[in-house]
Amino acid sequence: MRLIVGSVGWDHPGWSEQFYPDDLPPEWRLSYYANEFQMVLLPLDCWLAGNQEQLCAWREDVSDRFDFILDITGMATGDVNAMAQLDRCQAALGDRLAGVASWVSLAEPVRGRVQSLLGAEARFLAAATDPLEQESTVQVASNAAIGCALIPGDAGRDLKWLRLVMESLAARFSGASALRLFFAGVPPQVQVMREAVILWQLLYGSGR
């Protein structure tokens, strides 16, 4: 099982001091981010507002090893505009769109329509599942092959806590091909994201 680490969004003003160089143009931030991390979770309001030109530009700014995941939490059954935008995101992002995730339970009509739109087996739909027993603040979503977890705010600064969370996730998704950890926060803590990668390597080696 591979660990893939990313943040919720990449265009955070707070990163201009702790991650992005001061002289980096805003339009280069995604490329800079993608040089270190392999995925990003796009919040619902972010990808809903993206026009075709923006979406295509995002695709061109990353390598073939980078994944976009769309947060579909809050999509309503009859939201025709959101479904249409999801279809446009697929067309613009192409094979860089790895899948979608919802941190709350999906109504069956929404799940069915989203799954129908995603179509290709290469894309996943990860839906909310039971929280971790020892830490309910970590939101968890999964399907048969992928485990996803949303790490809140600065919680990951406690490496003992993060280790327990990662061990619990590894046990729960032992049969999955990948575990995706998304870090939230205002802004997400880049150093914590880096430490999560190192911690996973120490626990399981680069092959997990």
Image (cartoon, rainbow, N blue to C red):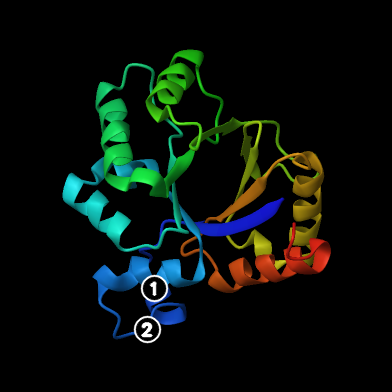
What residue is shown with label 1?
A: 32
Secondary structure, mark 1, is helix
Q: CA distance from mark 2 to mark 1?
A: 10 Å
Instruction: Give the residue at x 27% y 44%.
Output: 92
Q: Amino acid at mark 1?
A: Tyr
Image spot of residue 26 (x, y percent): 26, 71
Are the residues flagged by discs 2 and 1 in contact, CB closer than 8 Å?
Answer: yes
Residue nearest the viewer, comparing 123 with 9? 123
Q: Mark number for residue 21?
A: 2
Asked if residue 147 lies left or right of residue 16, the reply is right
7 to 180, vertically: above or below:
below
- Near mark 2 (Cα within 10 A), the count class, few <14, some 14-19 or many ≥20, is few
Image spot of residue 68 (x, y percent): 42, 50
Quadrant in which residue 24 is drawn: bottom left
Instruction: Compare marks 2 and 1 and give the one earlier in the sequence.
Output: 2
139 to 36, vertically: above or below:
above
- Near mark 1 (Cα within 10 A), the count class, few <14, some 14-19 or many ≥20, is some
Instruction: Give the residue at x 22% y 53%.
Output: 54
